[in-house]
Amino acid sequence: MMVYKILQSGGPIIWPLLACSLIVLTVILERMMFWFTLQRRRNRPLMDEILTLAEESEWEIIRTKTAGCRDHVIRLLIVGILHRDYDMGRAMEAEANLSVQNMQRFMPVLDTMITVAPLLGIFGTVLGIISSFEMLGAASIADPKLVTSGIAQALITTAAGLGIAIVAVIPYNYFNTRITRAMHVMEKYATSLEVVFNKTAKINEKNANENHAI
């Protein structure tokens, strides 16, 4: 009942604000589930083992061990290994960009809500103040509550808009931090794989030249 009274006192702008709050809640829950699932798929020991096997050129063993693995970093390494005879770096860059796009999904929506919600709140405040002044400008005011209702509308929409923005900005920054960390991890392992592969290729080339000389 209390919620209904607040919605009723908030004026017409309270309904777009309610829609914004539902959108924010939906995006936050979806992104939390996404990152939880992503974390469960992580397999750090296997990531390090892939680099060790790559140094020994054990490509078939890597293929067997990573079959069915859904870790996004391991997928990145596998894409690089599959394209090792062509352009390993660009192949991993394309895969990394795809992973980052998935991580950034719905983030612009959350960013928009952080901006729009306070603006809607201010808009509702202006409408409430206008309504109050219209009441004050009347020839006579039989009921002072008519004026206070406009003031209440102004305060409620402002509070609602700011509340939505505050609630949204914390997970927004958290998700962005997770994206940045994930990008650093992918870059670290992609660079390590390239270094290992180039080192192995040079050693194999040197051995081949020595055998040819003999």
Image (tube, grey):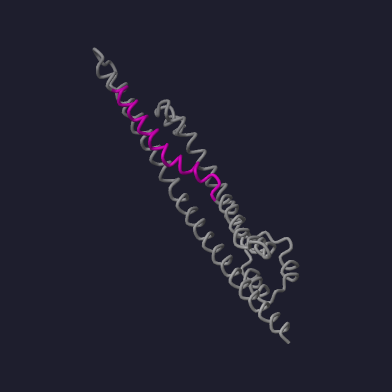
Q: Is residue 208 left or right of residue 165?
A: right
Task: Say which of 196 and 39 sits in front.
Answer: 196
Vertically, is 143 above or below 85? above
- Front residue of 105/40: it is 105
Q: Which residues are magenta?
A: 104-132
207 up-or-down from 182: above or below: below
Image side of residue 96 versus residue 143, left or right: right
To which quarter of the image does residue 92 belong? bottom right
Q: Position of residue 61 (x, y in %)?
A: 74, 71
Q: Position of residue 13 (x, y in %)?
A: 42, 28
**Which residue is painted at 24% across and 12% down in the image?**
139
Apparent side of residue 175 relative to residue 139 in the rendered image (left or right): right
Residue 71, given in percent of the width and then of the height, sits at: 64, 61
Residue at horizontal 34 percent and vertical 25 percent from the top: 127
Residue at left offset 60%, top offset 55%: 94
Q: Quadrant of residue 188?
A: bottom right
Q: Residue 74's x, y, as percent?
A: 64, 63
Q: Along the line of sight, which residue is nearer the eye, 142 or 213?
A: 213
> Any magenta on residue 201?
no
Magenta span: helix, strand or loop, mainly? helix
Q: How many numbered tags mark residues here?
A: 0
- The answer to whether residue 119 is magenta is yes
Identify which residue, 79 or 203, lies in the foreground. 203
**From what the image shows, is residue 109 above or below residue 131?**
below
Indicate the quadrant containing the C terminus: top left, top right, bottom left or bottom right: bottom right
User: In percent of the image, x 65 and y 79: which residue is there?
Assistant: 203
Residue 182 is left or right of residue 79, and the answer is left
Q: Which residue lies most toward the front here?
A: 213
